[in-house]
Every structure is written in C-alpha cells, then in structure tokens.
Image (tube, helix red, strand yellow):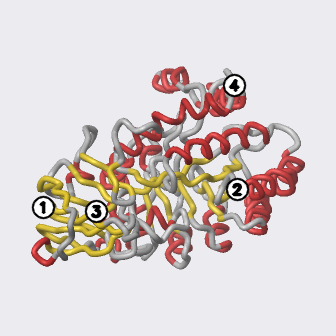
Amino acid sequence: MPETEVLYTGMSQLTTPAPGPQRGAAMRELRVIPDAALLVRGGQVAWVGRRQDAPAVSEEHDLGGVAVVPALTDPHTHAVWAGDRLADFGARAQGVAYETILARGGGIRSTMRATAAASVDELVALARPRLAALIRSGAATIEVKSGYGLDFAAELRMLEAVQVLAREMPGALVPTLLIHVPPPQGRAEYVREVCEVLIPDVARRGLATAVDVFCEREAFTVGETRAILTAARAHGLGLKLHADQFHAIGGTELACDLGALSVDHLEASGDAQVRALAASGTVATVLPGVSLHLGLPAAPARHLVDAGACVAVGTDLNPGSSPLPSAALALALAVRLCGLTPAEALTAGTVNAAAALGLRDRGALAPGQRADFLALEGRDWRDLVYTLGGQPVRQVYRGGQPAQQGERL
C-alpha cells in the first residue's frame, strides 16, 4: 500500500535551520524560502522548496499564506507534579527569603510531599493540561522529568504517569529520571541505592531514556553526580545535568568530561565553563523562565554562541522557579534576557533542543526529517519570538498531521 502524500502550500515563507545540532555562528544560518511548499510522505519531509517547483501530488493542503517553521522541542520540563507553590510566590513577593520559606514547610519540600501523596492517575490528570499548553505553544516534542518523589516509589509513579501520557501522544514525550534533592540524612546510602536499585529498575522497565542529576552546593556533589551518571551509562541511559544554577562547582566540566547530552541552567557559569562547553559536544541548555521568575542573572547564552558552543532553550516548566507552559515564550525570553538573536533562538528551540535529548530526526524541515512543523498566525517567522504572550502559533503538525486543539492529552 503506497504511503500517503500531502503537499502543503500557501506558505508566505518556510524558515528552517539545517538538520542536526548547530554551533556558534551556524546557529544564525537559516534557510528562508518564500512562497514555499512542503511535501510530506509517511510522516516525514519528502521535499521542500518553492511552490512553483513542487512535484505533482493528488492531495494538497493550503495553509492560508502564513509563515512555517519547524515545530519546537522543549528539552527541559518538570511537568509532572502535585500541589502548588502559590503561598511561596506571595511570600517571596513580600521579601521573605527562600530559606525561611523552606523552614515553614514550603519550597521544593512541599511539592515533594504533595507529589509523593498523589496516585499515578492523579499525576496524569494534573500534567495533561500543562502538556496541552506546551503543545499549543508550538512544542511537538517535550522532555518530562521525575525528581519530586525522593522516595523511589514516588519517583517511579512520576515516570509511570509520563508513560501513560506518552501513549496519548506517541513519540512526543521523552522521559528522564531526575535525581534532584538528597535526603536530610543518609545521603551516601541514598546515592548507593540510586545506583544499585533505582537506576537498574528504571532501565529494566524502560521508564526513562536518560538520567539527570542536580549538581549544586545544596544538592549533589561532583563526586556523587559522577557515581550516579556512571551507573546510568552502565545501564544504557543518556546523561544530563542541572549545573551552575547558583554556583559553579564543577558540574559543567563533569558534563563535558562524561560527554553528557546536555548541561542545563548555567546561570552561574563563567569563562571556564563557557570554554569547556565550546570545546565539547555537550549541549548548553538555557532556561530564561527561571531568570524571569526568580530574578536570577540570565545564563550567558550570548557568550556561549560566540565561543562556538551548541545552545538550546527550554521552559523548565515547574511549580517553583519557572511556571512557564510556553515553548514559544521561552524563545522570546531567550532573545530578551539571554542575548540570542531571533535566528539563534529558533535554532536553539528546534534542532539544538532535539540534540539535547539525543534526537537527530527532528527540528529541521529537510528531506528525511520528521514532518513536525508550525503554521504561524503571521506571515513572518520572526513573529514567533517577537510576540510576548498571545498565541503566535495557529496550528501544530506532528508527523504531517494536525495536532487537534481538543485532542485528549
């Protein structure tokens, strides 16, 4: 039976980076095709070019004269959680220190208590509208981390919730086991059990594709992080790190040394970390929603690009530091706060964001790539990163098929 072919026309322009991760100045090199057309066959891009040069096919679909770009990938979210941090937000707005909020029972510990008390079904129901919002904003691929469980049963329930949600949107959710916060006592035993019990169980059950560790003064040391990621690699899982969010203690250098897929946050990174990333294959993922919400200095994305690094952008959607369910707005903030150009931001949110998850089959509109693309509301692709708020995306297409706004997710 022949594969279905659809020729998408009615594009004022089609704009795309080249396939695969882009570094340094190459992040600004976009292909812009006016009056474009896109041929989709079997869920993949089969041809792209000017409408006048398009091959003849039996089925055409006119997009109405709007700009088209690759669909976005959100490479860093914590979309599965229970409870809220609204009291924390109000307290912080009145100048209450985070340490005081923690002492009162708030902060991340409150999210961990609520998440640990929730069932898989409850976690699924809570996460579904968050993921739907990310899709509406332009994300066709979304990474989702665990990390609010602490005890292993709760961590597994979080990953099981992601597994349930993934069945509703095949191929679009990427699950990550996050080792987030050490216990108040017995951390050496905890790290040992993570390495010898939790990671092998997650790998055996196929609940995650990678392991992420928060390497910070108040979280895990460089030595502990190395031990956990070494166990992850031994069980065939990818490596990721949260590092340099508040202090540069060596997490970024460890990520580069281990060949991690990505190292994320980087707000406290300096020249040494920028040089390490520029010399490595590890993707530097910046999270401007955190800088906006917490008032932290922005990650040095401009310096990273100028040094030749591969930079990605994520939302870091979570209840405490980045309640940002919009991949498009994350790109817009990366231009304002992190110093990226619009072209660099588009590359950072497409092929480079996919590379941060170990994916090379999406993020560009080129033959052989997944036909994940966005029909925008405007005629110029730059509206995607220019618009603050609102909805610059008219329609998301996954595998060449429209993601229905009302679909169950």
Q: Earlier in the sequence, mark 2 or mark 3?
A: 2
Task: Say what secondary structure mark 2 lies in.
Answer: loop
Disc 3: which residue: 341
- Mark 4 vs mark 3: give the one in front: 3
Kindly identify the residue that appears in the image at 82 percent across and 57 percent down: 195
Q: Earlier in the sequence, mark 4 or mark 2?
A: 4
- Estimate the spatial distance between the alpha carbons at disc 3 and disc 1, rounded to whole Å: 22 Å
Q: Are marks 1 and 2 in contact (CB under 8 Å)?
A: no
Residue 133 horizontal side relative to residue 128, left or right? left
Disc 1: which residue: 12
Query: Can residue 215 be seen in the rendering of this structure?
Result: no
377, above or below 37, in the image: above
The mark found on residue 206 in the picture is 2
- Mark 2 vs mark 3: give the one in front: 2
Kindly identify the residue that appears in the image at 42 percent across and 39 percent down: 132
Kindly identify the residue that appears in the image at 23 percent across and 59 percent down: 68
Q: Position of residue 291 (x, y in %)?
A: 44, 45
Task: Say what secondary structure mark 1 lies in.
Answer: strand
- Estimate the spatial distance between the alpha carbons at disc 2 and disc 3, rounded to whole Å: 38 Å
- Toward which corner of the image does residue 53 lie, by quadrant? bottom left
Give the class, few, some or many, for how many residues have Cα within 10 Å of label 4's Cα (few <14, many ≥20).
Answer: few
Residue 266 horizontal side relative to residue 349, left or right? right
The mark found on residue 103 in the picture is 4
Type of residue at label 4? Answer: Ala
342, above or below 122, in the image: below
- Mark 3 vs mark 1: give the one in front: 1
- Estimate the spatial distance between the alpha carbons at disc 1 and disc 4, rounded to whole Å: 55 Å
Q: Earlier in the sequence, mark 1 or mark 4?
A: 1
Q: Earlier in the sequence, mark 3 or mark 1?
A: 1
- Estimate the spatial distance between the alpha carbons at disc 4 and disc 3, rounded to whole Å: 41 Å
